[in-house]
């Protein structure tokens, strides 16, 4: 095997994404249709899970401004955990190019996450087995990236394996204002204004017609709503 083949990286899979702002009645109707054709996410508890994310940005709010301005190539970093379980924390970088998205991930321990929150980041430079950690370190060290705001919400996820389709409902979006004590289960949060219910549909190369039909929302339009941007209204 050639050296080129040995060092080749896996091909990045960019995914298509639709976002729709929907009503409570839409949610009930679409949920019923999806239950007939798709499967529930096996990681969900009673059909849903609770997500806490902490987003990063720099002094000039680069990620926020790029989102609001619709910049064609942009990225954002966040750390998150599910259902209050801090034994499984993920560092994620989401990238968008020409309307297509991809996500890179790396595991974090709770102590590592706390170190990042405390500004103790020197150790991240040595994480050769987690290049995403090294990238975050560089951007915190040289671009001023820092923890910015907590975003909490409830998600109902469905999976349709042909096309690697994922359909989610996100609602009850809450913010911790300027607080960033991400690991504190008692960190107070408030509703993020008049945030809508979000229907998100993500797929690889094709969207099967059975899912396209199931998520139809007459009169609804694709939206660029951002949970991070919504929560940043408060600081």
Image: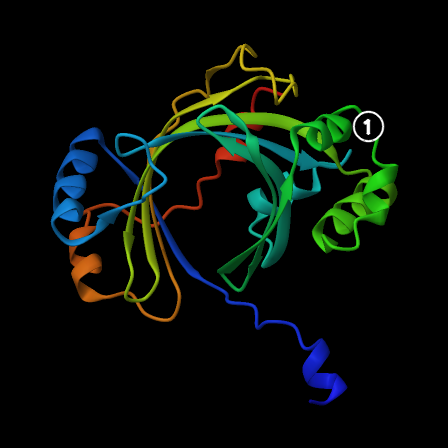
Q: How many marks?
A: 1
Q: Nearer the viewer, residue 143 or 4?
A: 4
Q: Residue at x 50, y 65 (%)?
A: 14
Residue labelled with disc 1: 119
Q: Nearer the viewer, residue 14 or 195?
A: 14
User: Residue 79 location in percent, x, y?
Assistant: 61, 36
User: Where does the N terminus fall, quadrant-wise?
Assistant: bottom right
**Image-quadrant location for residue 15:** bottom left
**Image-quadrant location for residue 55:** top right
User: Residue 135 location in percent, x, y?
Assistant: 76, 51
Q: Nearer the viewer, residue 22 or 165?
A: 165
User: Residue 40 location in percent, x, y?
Assistant: 26, 44
**Image-quadrant location for residue 113:** top right
Left/right placement of residue 20 relative to residue 143 reads: left
For disc 1, the neighbor class at 10 Å (few under 14, some 14 to 19, many from 20) is few
Question: Does residue 218 appear in the picture of this structure?
Answer: no
Q: Say if 4 sits above or below 14 in the image.
A: below
Question: Does residue 38 appear in the picture of this structure?
Answer: yes
Q: Residue at x 81, y 42 (%)?
A: 124
Q: Say if 133 sits above or below 234 in the image.
A: below
User: Residue 115 location in percent, x, y?
Assistant: 77, 28
Left/right placement of residue 214 relative to residue 94 reads: left
Element type at mark 1: loop
Left/right placement of residue 44 relative to residue 14 reads: left
- Among all residues in the image, which is located at the extreme front? 1
């Amino acid at each position: 095997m050639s050296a080129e083949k040995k060092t080749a990286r896996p091909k990045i899979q960019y995914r298509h994404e639709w976002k729709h702002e929907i009503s409570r009645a839409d949610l009930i109707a679409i949920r019923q249709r999806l239950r007939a054709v798709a499967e529930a996410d096996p990681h969900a508890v009673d059909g849903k899970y609770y997500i806490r994310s902490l987003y990063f940005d720099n002094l000039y709010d680069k990620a926020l401004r790029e989102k609001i301005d619709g910049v064609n190539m942009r990225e954002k970093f966040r750390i998150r955990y599910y259902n209050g379980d801090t034994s499984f924390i993920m560092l994620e970088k989401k990238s968008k190019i020409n309307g297509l998205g991809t996500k890179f991930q790396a595991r974090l321990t709770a102590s590592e996450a706390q170190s990042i929150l405390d500004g103790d980041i020197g150790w991240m430079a040595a994480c050769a087995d987690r290049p995403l950690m090294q990238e975050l370190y560089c951007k915190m060290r040289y671009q001023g990236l820092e923890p910015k705001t907590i975003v909490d919400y409830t998600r109902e996820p469905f999976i349709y394996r042909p096309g690697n389709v994922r359909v989610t409902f996100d609602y009850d979006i809450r913010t911790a204002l300027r607080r960033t004590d991400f690991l504190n289960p008692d960190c107070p949060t408030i509703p993020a204004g008049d945030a809508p219910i979000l229907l998100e549909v993500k797929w690889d190369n094709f969207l099967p017609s059975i899912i396209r039909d199931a998520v139809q929302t007459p009169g609804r339009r694709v939206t660029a709503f951002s949970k991070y941007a919504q929560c940043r209204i408060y600081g």
